[in-house]
Amino acid sequence: MTTGNAPTSENPSLTDEEVRTRLIRRSDMVPCKIAFIDCKMKGSDLKENYSLIGPGVTQSADQVVNLREPHGFSLGVAAMPPGVVNNLHVHYTAEVFMIFKGRWLFRWGANGNEGTVIGEPGDVLSIPTWIFRGFSNVGDDDGWIFSALGGDETGGLIWHPSILEQAAQHGLYLTKESVLVDTAAGAPMPPTDALLEPIDTATAESLRHYSPDEMRKRLVKVDDRKWSSRALLDSVLPGHRSEMAPVVGFGMMQDRDQEPAVTNPHGFSIEWLRIAPGEQVGKYMLDAKQVLIVFEGTAEVTLNDTGKEVSARVERQDLFSAPANTWRSIRAVGDVSLLIAVMTAGDEKKTITWAPEFVVAAAKAGFGIDHNGYVAPLRLLPFETRQAAAALIAAG
């Protein structure tokens, strides 16, 4: 019976201390106010940048990174008060915004005038690589966006030439190695041949153009989510009421009728996971690292095999990084439904290994996993699969 990669004695067990290092609470997150070259420009000087997993594209040596361990992607936060602007720049790797708080206007194009979209809490926007983009907090409250970048090495970014020019008026310069130099704070002025050369206007305007309709297809708003109540094998079991809605890439969804809205390679997938109060996703394992970002409710994440369990309580606005090949289960505690943005490394469809007790329970309920990794009626699966399920039931 196909359940994923078989567990081995090499599956790591985490200690309480190791679990704590992988739990990033809101109170652990440290802002940097001089992360980028536009940080002193009027209208952009109140930005805060957080690097939670991996360094991302920060240009400051003072940036605190909560978890430096490579994940195949970086995860950070842009926090901005109302009216504050993040200026035009280009990324080499995928950039995905998961809006936690605030009302945001995103713009793009060589001069930021090719179109705009509005994002609000719960919306997810994937902006294509190699186009200029910028965004502003156009709401009334302080805004907070979780921002994911593809790759452990992002290559940094390209600033619009006008931004480099304005930054120089405040004593800020970028070297060719993308090191931020603040001469107003006393740093020596780099030699001219050491400074980053801005791209020319013609090159900026030659980059690919995106229409508002094309960009809207890369914005998954709250009302666009397509939930599946049969997203996982254990969803068929009592006490396991969970739903998933795919957003970016191919994650761990086991409902064959569900497809993500954004399918081009990012280096990671993003799915929404919703668990009713008191319910859970049973013990499973992946061969990829997975980050759980709690948007609503409280999660109890339990790790390791039976008899070695350790747990982490992940509150709203916290996140937890689960290592590859480690057992974990997720329970919604409290009286509020749990809503998690699930990020999993890799572009391929993820293969779940379920703990044997859940494979047996699902088989007794008449369900199994087909050879493509999706939930299916057990009676329609090949004879050998049904025989294997019968043997598991007998052994259990």
Image: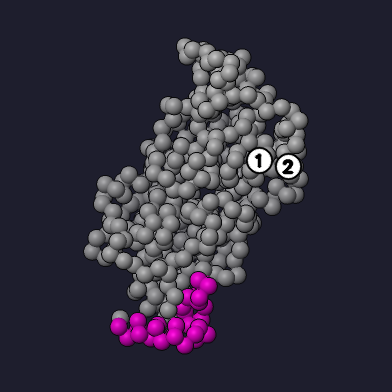
Q: Helix, strand, or loop for circle 2?
A: loop
Residue 86: image quadrant is top right
Q: How is the image coloured?
A: one colour
Which numbered disc, 2 or 1, marks the residue that appears first in the sequence?
1
Q: Of residues 299 and 206, which is closer to you in this image?
A: 206
Name the residue carrying label 2: 208
Contact between labelled residues 1 and 2, with CB atoms less than 8 Å apart: yes
Percent coordinates x, y for residue 350 in the rendering: 49, 62
For the point 53% across and 40% down, the residue is 154
Q: Which mark is residue 354?
A: none
Percent coordinates x, y for residue 337 in the rendering: 46, 57
Q: Is there any visible trace of residue 287 in the rendered image?
A: yes
For the point 64% across and 19% down, the residue is 166
Percent coordinates x, y for residue 15 in the rendering: 26, 52
Looking at numbered disc 1 in the image, what kind of residue is underneath it?
Answer: Trp
Q: Which mark is residue 130?
A: 1
Q: Find the magenta span and give its range.
A: 367-395
> Along the horizontal axis of the image, is 132 left or right of 238?
right
Inspect the magenta stretch and tell me whether residue 27 lies in it.
no
Quarter of the rendering occupied by the C terminus: bottom left
Q: 214 above or below 158?
A: below
Q: Is disc 1 surrounded by few (<14), some (14 to 19) or many (20+) residues within 10 Å?
A: some
Quarter of the rendering occupied by the N terminus: bottom left
Inspect the magenta stretch and tell me whether residue 383 lies in it.
yes
Q: Of residues 156 and 146, which is closer to you in this image?
A: 156
Residue 120: image quadrant is top right
Determine the CA span between mark 2 and mark 1.
7 Å
Looking at numbered disc 2 in the image, what kind of residue is underneath it?
Answer: Arg
Q: Of residues 193 and 149, which is closer to you in this image?
A: 193
